[in-house]
Image (cartoon, coloured by chain):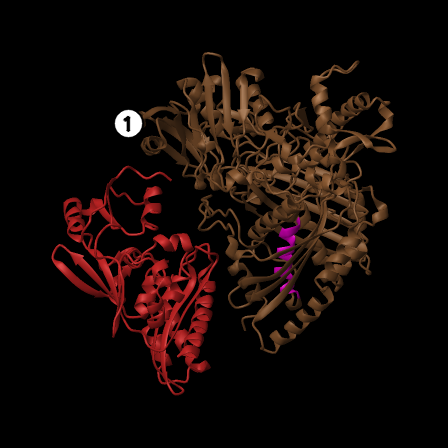
Chain colours: A brown, B red
Amino acid sequence: MKDDVESREDRVGKLKGLGCSRKRVEDARFTQGKGNYVDDIKLDGMLFGDFVRSPYAHAKVVSINTEEALKVPGVLAVLTAKDLEPLGLHWMPTLAGDKQMVLADGKVLFQGQEVAFVVAEDRYAAADGIEAVEVEYEELPVLVNPFEALKSDVVLREDTVDENGAPKDGAHGPRKHHNHIFTWEAGDRETTEQVIGEAEVVATSDMYYHRTHPCPLETCGCVASMDKVNGKLTLWGTFQAPHAIRTVVSLISGIEEHNIRVISPDIGGGFGNKVGAYPGYVCSVVASIVTGKPVKWIEDRMDNLMTTAFARDYHMTGRISATKEGKITGLHCHVTADHGGFDACADPTKFPAGFMNICTGSYDIPTAYLEVEGVYTNKAPGGVSYRCSFRVTEAVYFIERMIEVLAIKLNMDAAELRRINFIRKEQFPYKAALGWEYDSGDYHTAWDKALKTVDYEGLRAEQAQRVEDFKAGKTRKLMGIGLSFFTEIVGAGPVKNCDILGLGMFDSCEIRIHPTGSAIARLGTISQGQGHATTFAQILASEIGLPADSITIEEGDTDTAPYGLGTYGSRSTPVAGAATALAGRKIRAKAQMIAAYLLEVHDDDVEFDVDRFVVKGAPERFKTMKEIAFAAYNQAIPGIEPGLEAVSYYDPPNMTYPFGAYVCVMDIDVDTGVPEIRRFYALDDCGTRINPMIIEGQVHGGLTEALAVALGQEIAYDDMGNVKTGTLMDFFLPTAWEVPNYETDHTVTPSPHHPIGAKGVGESPHVGGVPCFSNAVQDAFRAFGNVHTNMPHDHWRIWKTAHELGLHG
Amino acid sequence: MIPASFEYYRPKDIAGVLALLRDHGDDARVMAGGHSLIPMMKLRMAEVPHLIDLQDVAGLGGIEVGESSIRLGAMVTQTEIIGHDGLAQAAPILREAALQIADPQVRNMGTVGGNVANGDPGNDMPGLMQCLDAVFTLVGQDGERQVAAREFYDAAYMTAREDDEVLTAVTIPLPKGGHAYEKQKRKIGDYATAAAAVQITREGGSCTAASIAMTNLSDTPVFCEEAGAALVGTSVDTAALDAAVAAMQAAIDPSEDNRGPVEFKRHVAGVILRRAIERAWSRA
């Protein structure tokens, strides 16, 4: 038999399990245009709904006249808040414990807010109907600055005050002002103040992490279909968390959960934009119930950029203290968080500022304090985690800037300052001052490898020469060396402290082995481009000894998939990946009993070997997993139920903490403000590596989105609350042309608590990349006195920095 | 992003186009590549009840490189300009500029005629054509007339073309000497923060003629006659460059947008022009 002569290495290779750069199984359909996205779904009699949106950022809605719109051929209905109110659906809960208007209930709070929902036979008629709806507005004073909002007499949300106009408690405690949402603290304020007060050196910085947007290529949308005969609602949508959507729909609509089927088909990128619930979902469901027909709603690009969940908008103030030698002693961070008109962040409920309290970063900082204040303004709601785990991007940007600012204050090399403050390998598991317990890390090894690879000393020497040349008039280009060392906190999360609206953030996997030795596994997560169908099959292949090519991975249909909280925050591998491995181990445990029976030995006398169980000490006596699968279904085995299936629900004991060391080398044209990225080196440690090719792809994607955010991508408003960057002309999405060549590298520090040691990687490059690009820009001007300038570093802002430093003569 | 409904026409000849324009007046617009007009219609900023597609109209294509001039049919695409070796030989600035317009997909559809006729101050070809002293052929109900590119632009989207006229061709005298099209933009596909078209000739060490036009620094392209004049008779030294830049600064009138404030745009315009002149001079 061939198996007899096959080497162990060959058998391992055939599985395409852990560590294999297996090609993505999804790509066959995507590269042929055969994906099935929400907008590809076409049902008989399907209607199309779209919104009348507010042109004003803050206005009273005096009246809505739908008469003319209803005369437009093809228009069937126009829903307003008045129609939704009897159903209690004119407002909906947000994931942050706030509530949000589904349709304008007497007023609008941001430009683009949903005012009425026009339902028509097709999207053309809907667009004509929107034009014909007459809305009378009465403009109100606009607040776009959160600091002013906290002082203003203007009450943005009437539901925040009692009958005497005094602020009422919010979802996260008392309000100190009617436009104040919450204050959230971590750490020890008193000791931190004391340490900083007595410190030898203190560096301070104000920084604004601007408002941006995840901008997935596919915008948000859904198709709602209410079957009035069987009472079942089917909802296809661009959902990053289909089960959570099902539960939320059930809770707010009163439809029993078994009568709701939520399906996330192929999703064209999410990056946090598709975690929350949007008015379009509610209106489509209502419209389908009202008309008895399927109703589709699909955003256009401007709708997406202007109204669905933004990211960041954090005004951060930092103080960091150290000894003269550079040992950090304390960190103080205050954040004013602009949430827009409604608090629609997608954070675990107990963390209204997400995991911002990871802002001590990769450093052993004994004392720290963080305070975040959420504020309402006349901007779109959101505050989601754009390619990061719940505000980690903000946290890492903050600390990586504070390190640079401190290095300037100490007149020290920023790489060295990092090195002397890193949490040391032997300190893990490390309990940080702001509460988290870092599971594992080896920062010094990664940092040294990175600096050596890029020849850091050589780069600094070259930079010093460049400064001399610049001063001598020999060049007009400066050189920046951007450094960043990040620690992510991903894999939300342990149910004891992570839930969203009470839904515990575990995840799940259910496996069925077929009699002929292939399998299907279903998970509670949903891929949006991450390649789950490829990588989860690899995890299983290594666990159960069947080839990854023989394992189908299915996600996104709540009628078939086990319950889980979806995909965001790099949680799929840390949580659902763990569930997959553990479900695989249950399969293997049963397979071991079957093998022992077939080999006529005791259970303990067989051991697993790649794709089979062998009799200990007699490797020629074995049963392959394929043979075992057949026997499981077709042979009567005393004491063992037929079949080979398993399910696992995994509640992680801790988060995972991937980390990495990035270096960017940039040349900056001082006269035009144009940066040119000469080199970008990214070392990632995501623990056990499942598919190196997919990791590399994730790193490239995350870095590209980091480049975008650092160098130009923003949602900007004017003083009247008009969105200035509502199209891709002004909203920066880099193309291949703007993207440099990335060098990727890695170290491997497995997570000690994850079943296969994996930590997640999708968001690391974004989290680490943003400060790296930003630091490169700012470092270029360090020799001329720059301490901090805000992102995005687009041409004119870089030029402005040079100009203000007197570099234009 | 859904346009209002419209009638779509695809006539085969210019007579058919003119007849439709006559019948529908202001309600009709001709469309070449559609990259400006269709987005405007989708945003419902342009209402076009009658849309006349020029794709099938005979006689609007073709690149002819003659003894003393070049004729570009209005429907010649940017991609065709880039791919035409004879043209690249005769007027290399056209390829250099076309390669800096948008991206390959847009250039496959975007035409010279549409680019110059629309009057969008962000378009690159109008300034380029002013630099090259091109002449536009307009065909209307009363026959054909010629308008110099330097006389064509009145304000943003306002040109010398009458509503019932069609721009059918661009004729360019064969350019001489060195050239450069220098453009700063935020990303591929963007309009210029500032762009400069320069064509320059020399005899020995002295500049004999210079033509300069700037893009996206006013509500029309800006032909800077005095900037060119400042170079003539000089060795294009620092003083001459300074004078040219100063003359250009007096002619432009940039406005603030997301690319940056006026002060920045003026500074960049100076840098870009300086670089364009230096590059063109090095090729002259």
Q: Amino acid at mark 1?
A: Pro
Residue located 41% across and 85% down the image: B235
Residue nearest the observer in this picture, A676 or A577: A577
Magenta segment boundaries in residue numbering:
A768-782
Residue located 58% across and 23% down the image: A558
Please count the marks in the image: 1
Q: Quadrant of residue A276?
A: top right
Residue nearest the observer in this picture, A736 or A306: A736
Residue A297 in the image, given as x and y percentages of width and height: 44, 30
Q: Does A769 lie within the magenta span? A: yes
Q: Disc 1 sits on a residue from what chain? A: A
Up/down of A12 relative to A561, above or below: below
Residue located 70% across and 39% down the image: A17
Up/down of A166 relative to B192, above or below: above
Q: Residues within 10 Å of mark 1 (few under 14, many from 20)?
A: few
Residue located 49% across and 25% down the image: A282
Residue A102 visible in this rendered orientation of the protein: no
Q: Main secondary structure of the magenta part?
A: helix
